[in-house]
Amino acid sequence: MPRFLVKDAAKHVGEKVKIAGWVNVRRAHGKILFIDLRDISGIMQVVFVPSNKEVYELAETLRPEWVVEITGQIVKRPENMMNDKIETGQVEMSVESLKVLSQSETLPLSIETDGYEIGEEIRMKYRYLDLRRERVKRNLIVRHKVIKFIRDFLDQENFVEIETPMLTKSTPEGARDYIVPSRQDPGKFYALPQSPQQYKQLLMVGGLERYFQIAKCLRDEDPRGDRQPEFTQLDMEMSFVSQEDVMDLTERLLILLVQNLFPNKKIQETPFPRISYKDAMEKYKSDRPDMRSDKNDKDLLAFCWVVDFPFFEKNDEGGWTFTHNPFSASKTEFEADLLGKKNIESILTSQYDIVLNGFEIGGGSIRNHRPEALEKVFEIMGYKKEIIQEKFGHMMEAFKYGAPPHGGIAWGLDRVFTLLLNEPNIREVIAFPKTGDGKDFMMKAPSEVDKKQLEELHISVKKPKAKK
């Protein structure tokens, strides 16, 4: 007999079905025993009576979080015993057979509450138990539904989903890279991608025209409260588009996503308002302005676009660095200044950021698709020609062979989920999060590795000096 999910079994009144899951609660009313059986789809009340002696005696041994398989008949509950608070509250199962699949020790943390009151360290250590919590489980199910909606939308818009490599080359793109030693090329290293930026542009050179990916990105950043060393982006790139094209598609997707999956949410204003970087800094003192008319309304969504960013800013050493992305193009009216490397402080880039309730949830730009323009960006940043060739020669080479104009955007999906689900931080919407400083209490990572592994990689570890 095939197993039914609880919510589906509830539709088969009068039929014999099999269900399986976890014992949520066991209770007795007189001689009748009840358990609430929980699976991913919901909870069902299951009834054991003494006349079925062998099954009844086994049911008396059941404890919370034991895993069981039960066969029985779905029957209507008595009128006065119906529970309108759960989807299956109109029915129950009259048990014929019971099998214990595994037992459970007493859990080291409660999973019956929202879990906010429990220390984060213990929740992360026992994350596989924390996932049983209804709120956390719901978050991951909603995450799945959002990603499916995005995939279906982009498929209709003629995008192709393409995976890009996780082992790539270390290039200066902002944050520090996580590096991976090469066993076959001693002393050389791969880098884990901070984003698929270069690959997605090379896909445009390859003629794919419309690409997207639900991409893992990894950045070795200093500890911050609401950051993760690995996070997920919705990454998109399009050929033959203007800034308006990219912004329009993003806006349509966000509006449809909210309307279809979060109907309780209200978008404050459509089309999304736009504000220049200069005006945002003057009016809101931030390039991530919170434009909500009522900041106490948790279901109010105030999207806005921030545009006209400066291309360059001074770094700590007094030189120039990019504000967002070295691969961005300048706005058309500043092309001559970029190519001439003059009026650098006044050059504006084609960068556009999408902001929600005071948080940047995405950013993109129209790209430099001409090698001479990209080279000037790196020259302004102080890179010598040989370094530019070493780090970005593959991009320069590619752009010589008929590169189409192109642009795109990437969303920080974890942050999008956090805001739409009214969660306090991104760790609540990630299946197996790490701490702000990159620790995994469950797997006890990072950890030391065998000496033999280090020898194979030609690596010696220098122990840090003891603090005085």
Image (cartoon, rainbow, N blue to C red):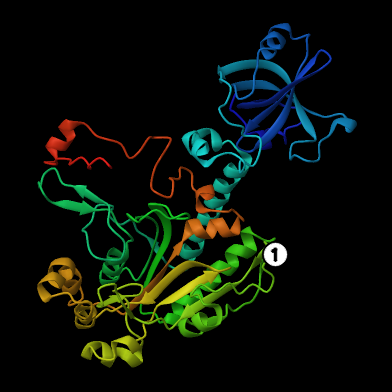
Residue 318, percent across and down? 26, 77
Q: Quadrant of residue 36?
A: top right
Q: Is residue 354 left or right of residue 340?
A: right
Q: Is residue 281 left or right of residue 259?
A: left
Q: How many marks?
A: 1
Residue 363, percent across and down? 43, 70
* Camera-nearest residue between 35 and 323: 323
Residue 45, percent across and down? 74, 28
Q: Is residue 66 above or below residue 260?
A: above
In the picture, the quarter occupied by the N terminus is top right
Q: Is residue 73 left or right of residue 157?
A: right
Q: Is residue 131 above or below residue 24?
A: below
Q: Disc 1 designates what residue? A: 297
Q: Residue at x 36, y 72 (%)?
A: 324
Q: Is residue 144 above or below residue 440?
A: below
Residue 12 in sight here: yes
Task: Specify the amino acid type for callout 1.
Answer: Asp
Q: Residue at x 15, y 31 (%)?
A: 452
Q: Residue at x 28, y 75 (%)?
A: 321
* Camera-nearest residue between 4 and 20: 20
Q: Quadrant of residue 464?
A: top left
* Camera-nearest residue between 87 and 365: 365
Q: Residue at x 70, y 12 (%)?
A: 60
